[in-house]
Image (cartoon, helix red, strand yellow):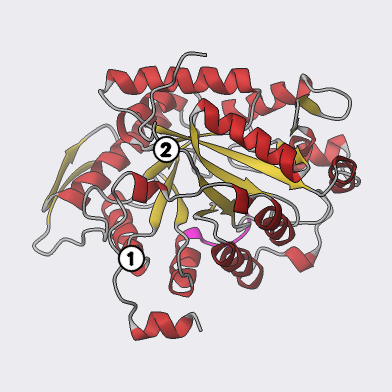
Amino acid sequence: MEKIKIRSKNLEGAEVAWFAPLCNGDDEYLSRHDMRYKSDWSNCSNVLLTADQLGYRNILCPSSYQVGQDTMTFASAVAPLTSNINILTAIRCGEVHPPMLGRAIATLDHILKGRLTINIISSNLPGMEMSSADRYQRSREVIEILKQGWTQDEIDFKGNFYNIKLPNTEPVKPYQQNGGPLLYFGGYSPPGVDLCAEHCDVYLMWPETEKNIYQLMKNMSEKAAGYKREVDFGLRVHVIVRETEAEAIEATRKLMSFVDDKRGEEIRLRAQDGKSYGVSRQSEMRNQSDKEGFVEEGLWTGIGRARSGCGAAIVGTPDQVLAKIQRYMDMGIRAFIFSGYPHLDECKLFGRYVLPHIKTFSMPEVQGRKPQSEPDTPLAAGLRK
């Protein structure tokens, strides 16, 4: 494989992140919801704070219209309780008027003292059907307006979706004043790839075969070069790690033991992006898998039978999981967002068996976005006790 052009090309480690189950996707058995794992403040904040304590460097707080908690509100509430972890907060472009969104993001960035990262989402809003090109154009305009607000004293923008001229005598700038929070982005259609190449910092992919992932990275690298830019690459993937391979395989069977095809389809299609091109690629991968659900060594696709979005898991012993991650790192992937079921239990298992063996860093630190730490306020220090 030829070398992929990435921003953090000389780094030997990775940003290892976990996932906060804000969208009611936490359970011991897929398709059999147990209220012990309800997507409430208690459960989700416990997962996030545990990840912080274990040394994960970031955590994705996802967004959904139908279930779970409001992402920005949750992130704002949990921020003063954290010590080191960044928070990757998902925003849906078009949901909030861009200047107001920029103000909210800047405020949250100050609460986190620069430990904020943003996951850009371009899905349809409920009740609206837009073409892929229009959705990504709307996202492009939102990003350009955000960047104007973060770096200038006036927003002056004319586009297809927004026409805004907004002077501000006292603009609220992000804590990260050299460009604002890093933008993480996932999308597969040509307009989405072009948007990321032009404006975003980390291109997030769902798990596929290593051959397919390499082609995605190569395509994005070439697109970014057209804008005289380089991006970093990330992988959003589940994980099941156990002391023995037999225990790991048994864990996959236990997780899916109550799933049938009809119920699985209902779960997949309830998501706002359940019919997206990215989800269809996960289905194609699943159709290529063996009878146990493995599409290649260490990558199990059965999990996609009962959830939309990321549909595969790295499965194996600590050494096998670590070896698979190292293969991805050798390809040039620098950011990982892991999750498992139940989320708290798997967070602890991965934190015990695998995380200590990976050299970790924070993407904002690497890319010069994260400012030097400042002394805690008495309130923040007190909240964490």
Image quarter of residue 260: top right
Residue at 87%, 30% (x, y): give it: 292
Residue at 50%, 59% (x, y): give it: 71
Q: CA distance from mark 2 to mark 1?
A: 25 Å
Given the image, on which type of amino acid does mark 1 rest? Lys
Q: Which mark is residue 113?
A: 1
**Dot 2: element:** loop
Would residue 308 be visible to someone looking at this image? no
Residue 294: x and y in percent read: 79, 28
Residue 171 drawn in magenta: no
304 on left or right of 103: right
**Dot 1: element:** loop
Magenta span: 64-71
Q: Which residue is mark 2?
A: 11
Would residue 227 be visible to someone looking at this image? yes
Q: Please tell me whether residue 211 is drawn above or below residue 58 in the rendered image.
A: above
Given the image, on which type of amino acid does mark 2 rest? Leu
Residue 69 drawn in magenta: yes
Residue 342: x and y in percent read: 75, 57
Residue at 28%, 62% (x, y): give it: 372
